[in-house]
Amino acid sequence: SAILSSSVALFSHEALISHGVLYWAQSIYQLNLALSLIVVFKLITFSSRERSKMLELLLVFLSFTGVLIEWTGVVFNLLLFSYFYFAPSNKNKRIAILIALSTLLSLSLIFIHYILALGFKDFLIALYSRFGSRNGARSNVIDLFRSYLVSYSPFILSLFVGFFALFGFVRRNLNLSFPRINKLKTIFLVSCMPLLENLILMQHATEFSFDRLKAIFPMSISIGIISAYLGTRYLRIAFQSLIIASSVFSLFTYYGQLNDATGIVWSKYHNWNHSLSNQLSTQVDLKCASISSSFGVRGYANLLFHRSIYENVRTNESAIKIMNNSNSCASVYLEGFNYATDMPVYTKVQITFPDGRKKSIRNPL
């Protein structure tokens, strides 16, 4: 059952796509969230006397680091605070207060860092701007659900069938108030808490699939619960076969995507961009040059050139002004288009030196 539950974390389309050579903050946060859920499960399983302060402090530490890693940590901590604060035990209230304090400390460190770098006003403007472009008003629930289907469709279908069968069995044979069932329901609900962030920042979760990684945990727990409590042996075997089939199907679709036309073109553009970066490094010292792009910049470009890049600079003349204002040794102006969200294609590079000399590199494709 445990091995089967982990299949969605290993073989789902999203897990395969979002855990590669390059990783996102959301990928690292998976480790933090997994440990947090384990600690929470132990806290709700152990009696007040069996709990150790070390376990409570570990949860507080994970709450602190989770916020530093990813915004989901803020949402998860707020809901975790509510859960522990309104629980009957005074020890739970103590945990809630510590989680709240650790969250405030993490946010303070993040805010101070950005305020020192940008200034208070510019930081607030940037924060408001990013929230405005990523929130739920920019997308809708239907598009978000479609995105989840792209990431997990065979597993979602299998879980739908499994829950349908389990619900029929539970109604007839299982007492839902049984203490062990209550604890499983609780940890399942706690694992769903981070998903609220997908609703708050719906546009981001819809466009960027790695933000849907957090759904792995409630799905894994669901697979475990269904496998453990589904009525007869034959029903369990049938459900487990569905999960295995979902894993195989996800693997085929993943490798199919890598080998189809999209994957081939992506590789072609990436190879060109890498070649261009190497050519560029022989023409100009990128360490002291100002680099500007005619369109938006995402992490791929920064990793490609190992530099920060001015984005949405409309003309080469504007790029030259940036060079003059920053006393750079050269201006590198990148022109091109976005083939995909995180795959720019650079068709032309214009290099201008302070003494007026100019060079250019064009896309040979």
Image (spheres, rainbow, N blue to C red):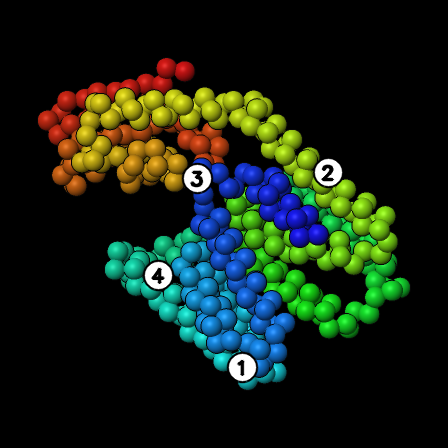
The label on residue 132 is none
The quadrant of the image that shows the C terminus is: top left
Residue 33 drawn above or below residue 362: below
* Secondary structure under the numbered disc 1 in the rendered image: helix
Q: Which badge, 1 or 2, comes first in the chain's sequence?
A: 1
Q: Is 154 displayed left or right of 131 in the figure?
A: right
Q: Which badge, 4 or 2, comes first in the chain's sequence?
A: 4
Check contact, mark 4 vs mark 2: CB within 8 A. Answer: no
Percent across and percent down for residue 1 are 70, 52
In the image, what residue type sits under mark 2? Ala
Q: Characterize the local packing of mark 3: few (<14), some (14-19) or many (20 or more) Cα atoms within 10 angstroms.
A: few
Percent across and percent down for residue 77 are 50, 67
The label on residue 110 is 4
User: Looking at the image, which residue is at 26% across and 34% down?
Assistant: 291
* Secondary structure under the numbered disc 2 in the rendered image: helix
The label on residue 245 is 2
In the image, what residue type sits under mark 4? Ile
Check contact, mark 3 vs mark 4: CB within 8 A. Answer: no
Going by the picture, which residue comes out furthest to the left?
355
For the residues labelled 1 and 3, the Cα–Cα distance comes to 41 Å
User: Looking at the image, which residue is at 75% across and 53% down?
Assistant: 227
* Secondary structure under the numbered disc 3 in the rendered image: loop
Q: Who is closer to the viewer here, 211 or 7?
A: 7
Residue 310 drawn above or below residue 44: above
Q: Is 102 displayed left or right of 281 in the figure?
A: right
Mark nearest the camera among 2 and 3 is: 2
The residue carrying mark 1 is: 91
In the rendered image, which quarter is residue 169 located in?
A: bottom right
In the image, what residue type sits under mark 3? Leu
The residue carrying mark 3 is: 22
Residue 301 drawn above or below residue 188: above
